[in-house]
Image (cartoon, grey):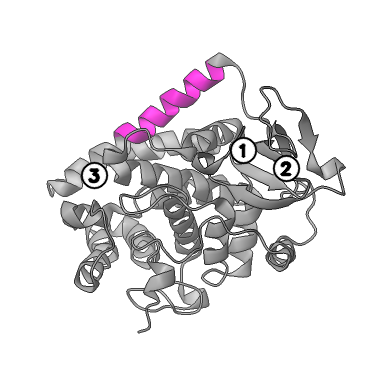
Amino acid sequence: MRILAKQTDLIVNGNAWKQDKEIEEGGVLRIREILGTQRPLERTEQPKEEGAFDECQKTYNKLYKFLNGVVEAAKAEKNFSLEDGLKVISEIVEDSKMVECLYTKTLAYEDPSDMLVYHSINVFIYSVKVGFGLKYSKHQLIELGLAAMLHDIGMTKIPEEIIKKSSSLSAEELEILKEHPLYGHEILYNLGKEYGWLAEVALQEHEREQGQGYPKGLKGDEIHEYAKIIGIADVYEALTHPRPHRRKALPHEAIEELKTLFSHKILKAFLTQLTIYPPGCYVKLNSNVIGRVIAVNSNSPLRPKIQVICDSDGRSLEAGRIINLSEEPLLYIINCLHEEDLQLE
């Protein structure tokens, strides 16, 4: 069995990308090839009303309460029910506005000490968005969502000192960490035969398209499609959020790591739904203008709408103008920036 630790275990070591590198033209072209010719997606606007955000927070709290309860039960080796989780997941997948609202909450953890719970909720949200992109039925979305929520339940059996270690793991510690899909399979299989598929998805979530994954080194169609979706969401989520031993990767850096690990079909759906320039990220244009992405153009995901925060001479602007890159053929993004690296006058 081949395991490419540098690629498949970036959630642990996280040092395979170069910090603050520019997006090479060839790289952007490769991503364009993956996306192909896009028709406009039927994306709903994110809810702006205060009441809508209150409802979004209530839904998020329900997800947290369910998953935190499951995690605590698994740690204590007690039985748990999936009923509350299935109920809230069913409500979410019927409301595309709610999915988009929840997506805005995935940009940061509210409490890093609860990383397992917040990470799993984020993976759930990303996975459901990909499921929408693949035109999944409601039943499929519910199954996918449940599997995504529980994909890392086996981590409850991994020692805390390994999970929260502030430096890279040793080879021995890495092998211990790689046992968590097996633990997850055992925990979920004990729920009953009707959840055998759920246990299998948790077991396969770290398998990769060309056999680079673990624990069995499965390839292609040997891997359940839910596991492929959750796998790409899992790696992307981990890379684009900070860990004790590293800062977060920028979206385009994370995408570079994903391209050789997942099928064209899954990667295309992922890029279309999540985009490499999500709202809130900072970008530099070929004109030297720096801006903050405020909206994604669904029919042209590489050309978002940005608000200028720094002009071409490096002067910061309090209320910069809006540039819609889909309407400005001579302007394009050359780099993504970490907020802490912005140097404004």
- Residue at label 3? 71
Distance (Cα) linking label 3 and label 2? 38 Å
Mark 1 near mark 2, Cβ–Cβ under 8 Å?
Answer: yes
Q: Please name the amino acid that badge 2 sits on.
A: Pro
- Residue at label 2? 304
Q: Is residue 60 magenta?
A: yes
Kindly indicate the quadrant of the structure image that contains residue 279: top right
Q: Tell me the magenta residue range.
A: 51-65
**Under tag 2, what secondary structure?**
loop
Q: Residue at x 29, y 62 (%)?
A: 168
| Residue 100 image position (x, y, % from top left) | 58, 35
Distance (Cα) linking label 3 and label 1? 31 Å
- Residue at label 1? 279
In the displayed image of the protein, which residue is found farthest to the bottom?
1
Please name whichever residue, 78 or 193, is drawn nearer the observer in this view of the structure. Answer: 78
Q: Please name the amino acid that badge 1 sits on.
A: Pro
Mark 3 near mark 2, Cβ–Cβ under 8 Å?
Answer: no
| Residue 115 image position (x, y, % from top left) | 31, 44
| Residue 45 image position (x, y, % from top left) | 68, 30
Please name whichever residue, 304 or 76, is drawn nearer the observer in this view of the structure. Answer: 304
**Under tag 1, what secondary structure?**
loop
- Point out the tag, 3 or 2, that comes first from the N-terminus: 3
Q: Residue at x 43, y 47 (%)?
A: 241
Q: Quadrant of the C terminus?
A: top right
